[in-house]
Amino acid sequence: MSVTGEQTADTRVPLRDQVRRELQDRIADGRLRPGDRIFEQELAAELGISRVPVREAIRMLQSEGFVDVLPRRRGVFVRGLDRQQVKELFEVREALEVYAARLASERAETEEVAQLADLARKAREAHEAGDVNAMSDANATFHDALVGLAGNDLLASMLEPLHSRLAWLFRMNLEPERVCTEHEALQAAIAAGDADRAAEVAKQHVLSSRQMVLERMLF
């Protein structure tokens, strides 16, 4: 990440929001793991900015549940998810993504569906090549694209705060073949314009993923 000044010249995004997104990405891709400490001064130096936007970004992440600020330990630590939080996350994901799949099957254009198929193909190729990171990235992008095809900005904004947590969960995938097969089936249902089938596949996909993650968790 490279930033200068209080806002970037092209997007005019405040620094605190850029830092927030950068930290979310690091949590999502595993560069920052649950329990890791975030050093405010070091991060500011790394990004070439003052500590003020870093501190503001940390406060935002704390309110969103991504980090814990522990005064007694005098530090900021990446927060993990317990079983109850994972269950709640999947409940919300089920409600929103199943609806997104239904809308996508009704609204998506042919070219957009083709892009979804390309993402499913990339995940399959990564799985067959044994590239776990590439598959995780393709799967996360597949879900983002699915929400985009729904054509509902409010729905997308409701899912956006969950992005990093979902991406973290995608990296816990112990059943890559199942995930690939379900994504391919979901894309096929959307391509066929079959809203009921798309919703059914999406729901089963979320429930299967929920069971897989909970079985892997040791706490």
Image (spheres, rainbow, N blue to C red):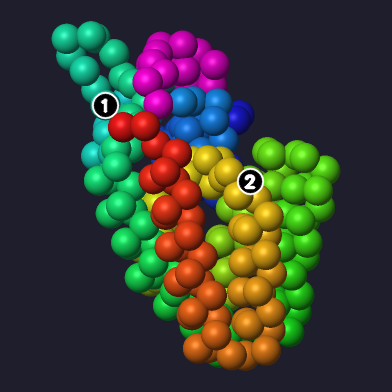
Whether residue 126 appears in this view of the structure is: yes
Q: Quadrant of residue 67?
A: top left
Q: The residue under label 1 is which amino acid type?
A: Asp
Magenta segment, which residues?
A: 34-49
Give the x, y percent position of residue 170.
54, 47
Q: Earlier in the sequence, mark 1 or mark 2?
A: 1
Q: Residues within 10 Å of mark 1 (few under 14, many from 20)?
A: some
Kindly identify the residue that appears in the image at 39 percent across and 45 percent down. Answer: 214
Give the x, y percent position of residue 125.
81, 52
Foreground residue among 135 and 12: 135
User: Is residue 113 located in the magenta-colored stretch of the structure?
Assistant: no
Whether residue 25 appears in this view of the structure is: no
Give the x, y percent position of residue 68.
26, 26
Q: Quadrant of residue 56?
A: top left
Q: The residue under label 2 is which amino acid type?
A: Ser
Task: Identify the secondary structure beneath mark 2.
Answer: helix
* Dot label at residue 68: 1
Q: Residues within 10 Å of mark 2 (few under 14, many from 20)?
A: many
Q: In the rendered image, which residue does mark 2 sit on? A: 136
> Do tag 1 and tag 2 residues touch (Cβ < 8 Å)?
no
Q: Quadrant of residue 111?
A: bottom right
Residue 15 appears left or right of 8? left
Most extreme residue toward the left is 72
* In this view, 203 is above or below 169: below
Give the x, y percent position of residue 216.
45, 39
Residue 191 appears left or right of 194? right
Kindly identify the residue that appears in the image at 68 percent across and 59 percent down. Answer: 180
Quadrant containing the N terminus in the rendered view: top right
Quadrant containing the C terminus in the rendered view: top left
Residue 215 appears left or right of 191? left
Kindly identify the residue that appears in the image at 31 percent across and 19 percent down. Answer: 76
Kindly identify the residue that appears in the image at 81 percent across and 48 percent down. Answer: 128
